[in-house]
Image: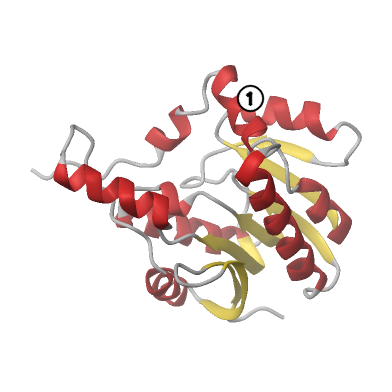
């Protein structure tokens, strides 16, 4: 009998200790990651400005909430969701008076009703999920909950990640190799769940381009 494909628990478990959650928060405050943060914030700001007023936006996984203020300015209500209660705890501390609701939930089983939000931002999750089957389950669930837009980050492996992957193949360890997510995969998955591509916003230029990819429900009004 085939074993069921594991979910995204391995990724989630990384942030079940406060120290790990704090390291994730702090990494975007200095060095090259601070520049990445600036670029991602500018890109998201431009993206949501082009979508018009939004009633409800969902950030899943929200991490420590570093992009929440951008969604809050464009939406009447923002829901910050994450599997890690520690991430949500830090997000509350970081955001202070920024209006938001907080929800502990899993991307494969989102604790929200069908079509209950206008926009879902799913940033820096799918590229960390090792199995294509799990990415497909998550995409289907995201498509269920949004009634209009889904924004995902497509981060194909950059130079550093490709070097690490090469070294792992030359010196194999106990960890299985990941199946890298591609833009084509995201487009195929989106099409299968009734989403259509409406935009790409560059996060990282060529040769290993990364994007915020914007999908819309095919039957959205």
**What's the residue at 87%, 31% (across, down)?**
96
Residue 72 vertical placement versus 221 (above, below): above
Secondary structure found at label 1? helix
Comparing 29 with 153, the one in front is 29
- Label 1 sits on residue: 22
Q: Position of residue 83 (x, y in %)?
A: 55, 34
Q: Position of residue 206 (x, y in %)?
A: 50, 72
* Structure colour scheme: secondary structure
**What's the residue at 68%, 44% (across, down)?**
34
Q: Position of residue 52 (x, y in %)?
A: 83, 73
Q: Position of residue 25 (x, y in %)?
A: 66, 32
Residue 84 vertical placement versus 144 (above, below): above
Does residue 172 appear to the left or right of 43 in the view shown? left
Does residue 36 appear to the left or right of 157 in the view shown? right
Comparing 11 with 150, the one in front is 11
Q: Indicate the quadrant where residue 213 lies.
A: bottom right
Q: Indicate the quadrant where residue 8 lies.
A: top left
Q: How many marks?
A: 1
Q: Crowdedness of circle 1 by 10 Å Cα count: few (<14), some, many (20+)?
A: some
**What's the residue at 32%, 45% (across, down)?**
164
Q: Is residue 187 visible?
A: yes
**In which quadrant is the N terminus drawn?**
top left
Does residue 196 appear to the left or right of 50 in the view shown? left
Residue 59 vertical placement versus 102 (above, below): below
Residue 24 vertical placement versus 4 (above, below): above
């Amino acid at each position: 009998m085939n074993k069921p494909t594991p979910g995204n628990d391995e990724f989630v478990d990384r942030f079940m200790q406060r120290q790990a959650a704090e390291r994730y928060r702090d990494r975007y405050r200095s060095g090259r990651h601070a520049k990445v943060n600036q670029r991602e914030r500018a890109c998201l700001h431009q993206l949501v400005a082009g979508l018009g007023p939004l009633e409800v936006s969902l950030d899943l996984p929200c991490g420590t909430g570093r992009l929440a203020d951008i969604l809050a300015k464009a939406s009447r209500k923002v829901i910050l969701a994450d599997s890690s209660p520690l991430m949500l705890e830090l997000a509350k501390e970081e955001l202070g008076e920024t209006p938001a609701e907080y929800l502990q939930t899993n991307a494969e089983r989102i604790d929200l009703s069908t079509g209950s939000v206008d926009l879902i931002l799913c940033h820096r999750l799918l590229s960390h999920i090792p199995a294509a089957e799990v990415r497909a389950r998550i995409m289907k669930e995201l498509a269920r909950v949004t009634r209009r837009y889904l924004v995902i980050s497509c981060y194909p492996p950059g130079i550093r990640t490709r070097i690490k992957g090469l070294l792992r193949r030359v010196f194999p360890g106990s960890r299985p190799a990941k199946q890298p997510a591609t833009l084509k995969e995201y487009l195929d998955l989106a099409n299968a769940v009734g989403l259509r591509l409406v935009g790409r916003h560059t996060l990282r230029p060529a040769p290993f381009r990364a994007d915020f990819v914007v999908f819309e429900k095919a039957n959205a009004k």
